[in-house]
Image: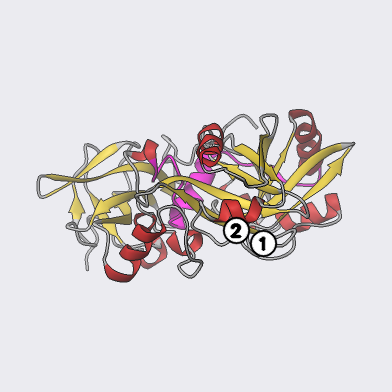
Amino acid sequence: MSEDVDGSSSHVGLRPEGYEALRTGAALVESRSADWLRLTGSDRLRFTNGLVSCDLRSLSAGNGEYGFFTDPKGKVIADAAFFATESELWIELARGRGAPIAEHMGKYLVADQVEIEALEELKTVFAAGPEAAGKLAAAFGRVPEGDLWSGLVVEVDGSQLVIRSERRLGVPAWVLAGSRETLARVTEGLAQAGLRSAGAAAVASLRIEQGVPWFGLDFGADAGGGNFPQETGIEDWAVNFDKGCYLGQEVVARIHFRGKVNRSLRGLVFEPDSEPRAGVELVWNDQVVGVMNSVAGSPAMGCPIGLAIVHRKAESGADLSTPYGPCRLVDLPFDTAVGTGPTATT
């Protein structure tokens, strides 16, 4: 495997290598390089719960959650997957967010019994597809049990390997995290067990087809500014509106119960023969209403598709202009939009 998954692709071919293996079988995919933190100390769950949008208060060993770190204004500054062991809280963050989030958390440590450790040596890969769970169980004797985002730590030749269930690829998936040497041994064994190699284009096709945005690409600072959770399209994954106080909670709750956001995650459907690129501005009525940062060829729809956070003034069904030709704005998920390309008849 040589591709590092970045969530999008400049190649919009409609049969990306590994797509079928991910959709119907099992495949290995190089992950975007992730940053990992490990928290210890008796206050680790209570303390972290006050900084994130998901509920960690009663997280039991082996179980996990997904949520957003938000700033005092309610804007998302990182997304994070959490899972607990008997004595630790593991946090997986997007590449480059480990140090800023560790510093952010440190600002709010007062008398809490918490220690924050950056695990810089951890590298990650995905084992993904509907048959991946069986392959992992055969290799390690078990897979994480419990709800989504659950995890466990196993030993491989005396070294630790993290296995955590994952939702952000658009298919059943598990993150495998360990040292470079450990992962090399593990992936070699899984390849011999029948897991094929899949690349960035296949992952982009599947996750975009399922309408799954990625932090730093579709939302967050690298995607053109901070976003409220309600703009991401996955607030139902990440926000618990019953948990009570956390940093930025008042703003997030006010939007949920009393207001609405001006922008939201939407899908884009291009002409079958177009070759759109990420980073393109979307124009409606001579106004820029969004920027598309994720694009891929879709085998399911037979054309290129994309994701973008778009201003609500552009209604679903509108035709938007781009340098690569027109695209149609649709609601997610895409399976409700088959046949709604820019030139489709209605």
Q: Amino acid at mark 1?
A: Leu
Tell me what residue is drawn at x 24 percent, y 62 percent: 316
User: Which image quarter is the C terminus in?
Assistant: bottom left
Question: What residue is disc 2 on?
Answer: 65
Q: Give the CA separation, mark 2 to mark 1.
A: 8 Å
Residue 199 shown in magenta: yes
Residue 291: x and y in percent read 28, 42
Q: State yes or no: discs 2 and 1 in contact (Cβ < 8 Å).
A: yes
Q: Position of residue 170 (x, y in %)?
A: 53, 55
User: 315 above or below 116?
Assistant: below
Which of the pair 55/108 is nearer the observer? Answer: 108
Q: Which mark is residue 317?
A: none
Residue shown at the point (59%, 34%) measured from the top left: 33
**Other-residue count near label 2 (Cα within 10 Å), few / some / many at <14 / 14–19 / ≥20:** many
Start and end of the magenta stretch? 192-220
| The magenta stretch spans residue 75 | no
Q: Residue at x 41, y 65 (%)?
A: 335
Which kind of residue does numbered mark 2 sit on?
Glu
Of the image marks 2 and 1, the number of the one nearer the N terminus: 1
- SS at mark 1? loop
Q: Which residue is mark 1?
A: 59
Can residue 15 be seen by looking at this rendering?
no
Q: Quadrant of residue 181?
A: top right
Where is residue 299 drawn, in percent x and y?
46, 52
Left or right, 315 with respect to 110, comes to left
Viewer-nearest of labels 2 and 1? 1
The answer, for residue 316, to whether it is visible in the render is yes
